[in-house]
Image: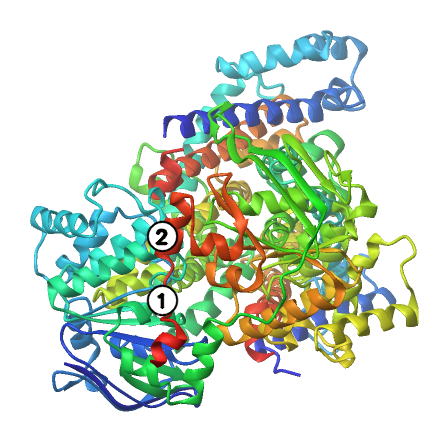
Amino acid sequence: MARYLLLRALSLGLSLVVASVVIFALIEVIPGDPAAFMMGLNATEENLAALRAELGLDGSALDRYVVWITGMLTGDFGISYTYRVPVAELVLDRLWVSLPLAVYALTLSTLIAFPIGILAAATRGTATDYGIMGATQLGIAIPNFWFAMLLVLLFAVTLRWFSAGGFPGWDNPAAALKALTLPAVALALPQASILARVMRSALLETLDQDYIRTARAKGLSRAQAIRRHALRNALIPVLTIIGLQFSFLIAGAIIIENVFFLPGLGRLIFQGITQRDLIVVESVTMLLVFAVILVTFLVDLAYALVDPRLRRR
Amino acid sequence: MSRLPPALLIGAALSGVFLAVALLSLVWIPHPITGVSIATRLQPPSGTHWLGTDQLGRDLLSMLMVGAQTSIAVALIAVGIGVALGVPLGLAAAASRGSPLDEIIMRGNDLIFAFPSLVIAILITARYGPSATNAILAIGIFNIPVFARVARGGALPLWTLDYILAARTAGKGKLRISVEHVLPNLMNLLIVQATIQFSLGILAEAALSYVGLGAQPPTPSWGRMLAEAQTMIYTHPMLAVLPGLAIVLMVLGLNLMGDGLRDALDPRLRRGRG
Amino acid sequence: MISLDRLSLSIHGTPILRAVTLKITPGEIFGLVGESGSGKSMTALALMGLLPRGAETTGAARLDGTDLLTLSEPDLCRLRGSDIAMIFQEPMTALNPVQTIGDQVAETLTIHGKAKGAQARRIARDRLDRVGLSHVALDRYPHELSGGQRQRVCIAAAIALHPRLLIADEPTTALDVTTQAQILDLLKDLVAEEGMSLLVITHDLAVVADMADCIAVMNRGEIVETGPTAQVLAERRHPYTRALFAASSHAPDRAPQGAPEPLLAVESVHRHYPGPRQGFRRGPPVEAVKGVSFELHKGESLGLVGESGCGKSTLTRAILGLDPVQGGDIRLFGRSIVPVMPPELRAGIQVVFQDPYGSFNPRWRVERLVAEPFHLLTDAPKGEDRRARVAEALRAVHLSPDDMAKYPHEFSGGQRQRIAIARALITRPRILVLDEAVSALDVSVRARILDLLAELQDAFGLSYLFISHDLTVVRAITDRVLVMQSGEIVEEGPTEAVFDAPAHPYTRQLLAAAPRLPDLTEAQA
């Protein structure tokens, strides 16, 4: 177990290093002057020189990478060019919107997906199964940002149950949660559809296994065999998908924040792009990639909890 | 000939309609969409404009037709990138299972997986400005590890089969075996995956154009039509509903086709009929 | 008393069983014998009430007067595991991989409400002790156990509630002979101790000949002959029983051959695998083959016998030039194939594998499949010539040249094995390596393939290296035999001599463990 953990942790570290090099190279190393790009056409030579100095563009690529990455490691993400405040501050602020949104959506999609996936598998071949499969097929096909617009149209414009966007801050947690509800539902719909389908097929696959037949021969009913033997084995492929889904969830969140005008990391990154604030873009993308890699790592750990065959390696 | 799954027929019909419309739009659309005509803006559906017009007076049906072109082109080229680079990588990894080459390919794959299409698009756009090419690149790069994994995962069990050993005792090398024996038997798997990635590509293209990282004006695209319609959702909801519906139907068609193909091509199901 | 009364079964309209009638009395061991597709497993599943969807039955399956076929699902659940228990063929997959063996044995008790918690675990411990796993802790997971141990866990779970009938469906088919013998002994002991009945389902007449009180022979969904074991084996009234009996111990007519001209010489070959990964280092290398030497002579049939994991497959791959060796030399037709086999030598040594299904690219036609080894020839025949050569090879294995245009899935298992032999013959090799080539076949098919092999050897002067775990087959087809254990050859000699008077203890153990049919002449007396 310890060895398995250590190996996974090492691979996590390695992935982060390579990912950071890729991001750094894309933003700062490939030909073209980032400073000129950031300031636009009517920049004066002095201003450019000042910005180059501020960005540390005068040093070698290696020096700059080391400075950037040690900064990231110590929580110093640089100063935003447009906001003139530390990027770390901006990020921390925005994280309090994006992170709860992602967790909210993930929770919703799991809570929806597991029961209906299991129900579909247990009622395989019946009208219930076909109904669920049809609904999830549709759920996958609906773009989340369009679904978000439809939700706004129905619940904010027509029914007026929710506001169409904006975020009141966490001073009033109930209001904050309410503001995140429509975005989370929009995010969760395609995720839940995919997850339910995976849950169903994983469960059907395990139900075909020999050990289910053994369990039935011991006197377990079909439902007992599902509950006691099939579910935990089916969880292994489901976990894989949850892990892979996380990167889609992050991408989805970035887009959904734009639909609902939520002041999260997604908004920050798009403001960064339009204002050509490369410092913000670089640091925030690194954070997002870090989050994806970290979740992959956590999923690997979860495997070991579910599957004893991994534990004693 | 055995009966085809209904999902395949419905899916193929839906996707076929969109493909036909996209091809048709290359030579004919009901109204030109280049000009701005304030006089005819935001018209309801009528005999001349079957689906009405948008905020710039352009015919909505024509916009949707040309939008299909953009979506299909971007998603198709992105699938092409994924297949062209991912499949050889996956085959090479499987042929050299457990070797450093396999390890490098798979770790590289994991790394690309950590960069969602959107993040790649953000990085490219942040540095070079937005364009449809960015969208193609971003989606295409993300497709590479997908196809590499599918190809490797499908090839590994094949490599343990006796016919591969027989081919080796017939003096054939790994490259030749990969091409002659492995790839043809992966075709079903790859076709199904290509359909899925195609539909994901349509969704991703729409999302990227919606946030302004994809196709730029004046190229019509379903995602950007939605973005432009968003501010008018209170007054003219149809402008936001129709492009979304186009995306849903196209993606639904492709997904149904993928599911149907999987059933039709599944050797386990076929053996029973054989 | 358990009985089937004119049980007929069809699945989605296809008849599977026809009027199957049998009786199993308490304390009796009943053997149900048949080849694949005979319906023997479906008979067992009918007794368990675990038939697949779409199954329709007529007749009755009675457990003391109760007709099991009329019971409701909850009633059946109460019955399964407590009155009737069952174990299956594949111990490797029959246990839940994410649950401890203790929990899986205890589950039989808890699910029937007979014990719970610590008490259930105590009984589970006791049952595991009884099946010979006293040294294995309750908190072990299935993947930590060997195949034989897992089958014992399955048995422990099955007998936890002292069922009246235990059904064992091919319980030892996936196991090595020595393990098989131990499991069969265990089952016999349990029957005697527990007073339960045992229904053993098998394709191997020899397995039940030893232990069953009564046997029934099944063919195409019907019981063709049944009665006390000794009587059935002696009388063999039904032609199918006679055929099955003859095929089980079939030895083709062949004259001992072989000239002292070594075609293949294996000289103290070593073969290692990298050790298992331990963090960043690897453990010590696994030695699969430890200094093996032997010669294969011209026209000779040489057997290589051993249980799974003994290194015989690894050795085979090295001889075929598929894997490198770490020490020693392999000389083929006088030339060394270490480290790399010269391509021109490959045409002289070809191979037939075990699995008649995995042996062919499903997308190729027979003509292309059989012609594939032409790749080895620099002057490979083309066009009509090529077709003529393929036709010739197909005729040699008693297939029709018309079969060239077909795909592999259009053939039966035995026919596929003939195609595999045709493919191996196409380059006119001098050595044929037969790697468990008849192990996956039903006995009657196996007998015909053995005849074919004997005929081909005679016709083409082939040398055979015949690798198998099946002692009966090796005895039937080889002149000389090598016995392999843990990477070493422990005994070598003329086949009859080794089988009649084994010198090495391991050989003796193997021979003792192998189930044997009573001698034909003896049984007739």
Q: What amino acid is labelled 2 in the image?
A: Thr
Q: What residue is pinned by disc 2?
A: C178
Q: Quadrant of the N terminus of chain A?
A: top left
Residue A262 at what x, y percent from top left?
Answer: 48, 39
Q: Residue at x 73, y 33 (%)?
A: C339
State which chain disc 1 sits on.
Answer: C
Q: How many marks?
A: 2
Q: What residue is pinned by disc 1?
A: C170
Q: Residue at x 92, y 65 (%)?
A: C382
Residue A178 at what x, y percent from top left?
Answer: 35, 46
Image quadrant assignment for residue C328: top right
In the figure, is residue C243 to the left or right of A274? left
In the figure, is residue C311 to the left or right of B216? left
In the figure, is residue A86 to the left or right of B30? left
Q: What amino acid is labelled 1 in the image?
A: Glu
Foreground pick, B130 / C460: C460
Up the image or down, A87 lies above or below A250; here it is: above
In the figure, is residue B46 to the left or right of C439? right
Query: How far apart are the alpha carbons under marks 2 and 1?
Result: 16 Å
Instruction: Name the secondary structure under disc 1.
Output: loop
Up the image or down, A172 lies above or below C420; here it is: above
Q: Residue at x 58, y 59 (%)?
A: C478
Mark 2 or 1 closer to N-term?
1
Q: Quadrant of the C terminus of chain A?
A: top left
Is residue A220 visible in the rendered image? The answer is yes
Category of crowding for the residue at label 2, using alpha-carbon neighbours closer than 10 angstroms: few (below 14), some (14–19), many (at least 20): some
Residue A45 at what x, y percent from top left?
Answer: 81, 11
Image quadrant assignment for residue C453: bottom right
